[in-house]
C-alpha cells in the first residue's frame, strides 16, 4: 500500500489544530496520513504518484480549496476529494462538485462519518488494512 500510495489520506487545511486532530484520528485508525498547511504547500510537495484521497478545507488564505480544485483538480489523476468547511452556501457546494469534489462535510463533522467516507473512497485493500 505505501509503495503505491493508494491508502494515503492527504489533509490540506491551514488551521493547525483542525489538521492535527484529523491526523490523530486517522492515524489512530491506522490510515497513512500526509498533511499540508496550504494548497500551495500541497502543490510543492505532492509527488503525483500517491493517490489515496484528499480532505481539502474550503477557506484558506492565498488559494482557497475551491480555487485549488478549479485550477489543479484535473492534475490529481482521479484522486477523490472531500471538501470540508465551517460555512458554505449552495452555490459554493455546486461549484465544488463541478470542480470534482466527491463529498462535502460541514465542520464540525462526525468522526464516524468522516471515517466511513474515507473507507468508501480508498481502494478496498487500503481501507481494510487501515482498520486492522
Image: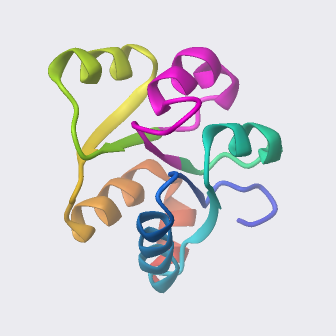
The x and y percentages for residue 43 are 74, 37
62 falls in the magenta region: yes
The number of numbered badges drawn on the structure is: 0
In this orientation, which residue lies closer to the viewer: 31 or 108?
108
Q: Residue at x 52, y 37 (%)?
A: 61
**Residue 62, relative to residue 53: is it above or below?**
above
* Residue 132 horizontal side relative to residue 8, left or right: left
Residue 55 located left or right of residue 120: right
Considering every residue shown, the one lying at the far front of the view is 61
Q: Position of residue 110 (x, y in %)?
A: 19, 65
Q: Residue drawn at (81%, 41%), measured in percent from left and top?
A: 44
State yes or no: residue 74 in magenta. yes
Against 63, is 35 above or below? below
Where is residue 82? Give x, y as percent: 40, 42
Residue sitting at 45 percent across and 17 percent down?
99
Give above or below for 90 relative to 23: above
**Foreground residue among 31 and 72:** 72
Q: Which residue is painted at 40% across and 56% down in the image?
A: 118
Quadrant location of residue 22? bottom left
Quarter placement of the N terminus: bottom right
Q: Please tell me which residue lies in front, 100 or 23.
A: 23
Asked whether residue 64 appears in the rendered view, the answer is yes
Give the x, y percent position of residue 57: 43, 44
Q: Is residue 48 visible?
A: no
**Considering depth in this image, is 66 or 34 the residue closer to the camera?**
66
Structure colour scheme: rainbow
Q: Which residues are magenta?
A: 54-80
Amino acid at each position: 500500500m505505501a509503495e503505491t500510495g493508494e491508502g494515503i489520506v492527504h489533509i490540506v487545511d491551514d488551521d493547525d489544530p483542525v489538521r492535527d486532530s484529523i491526523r490523530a484520528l486517522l492515524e489512530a485508525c491506522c490510515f497513512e496520513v500526509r498533511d499540508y498547511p496550504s494548497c500551495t504547500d500541497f502543490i510543492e510537495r505532492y509527488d503525483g504518484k500517491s493517490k489515496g484521497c484528499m480532505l481539502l478545507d474550503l477557506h484558506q488564505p492565498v488559494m482557497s480549496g475551491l480555487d485549488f480544485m478549479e485550477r489543479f483538480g484535473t492534475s490529481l489523476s482521479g484522486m477523490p476529494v472531500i471538501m470540508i468547511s465551517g460555512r458554505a452556501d449552495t452555490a459554493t457546494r455546486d461549484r465544488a462538485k463541478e470542480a470534482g469534489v466527491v463529498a462535502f462535510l460541514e465542520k464540525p463533522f462526525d468522526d464516524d462519518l468522516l471515517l466511513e467516507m474515507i473507507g468508501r473512497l480508498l481502494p478496498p485493500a487500503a481501507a481494510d488494512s487501515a482498520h486492522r
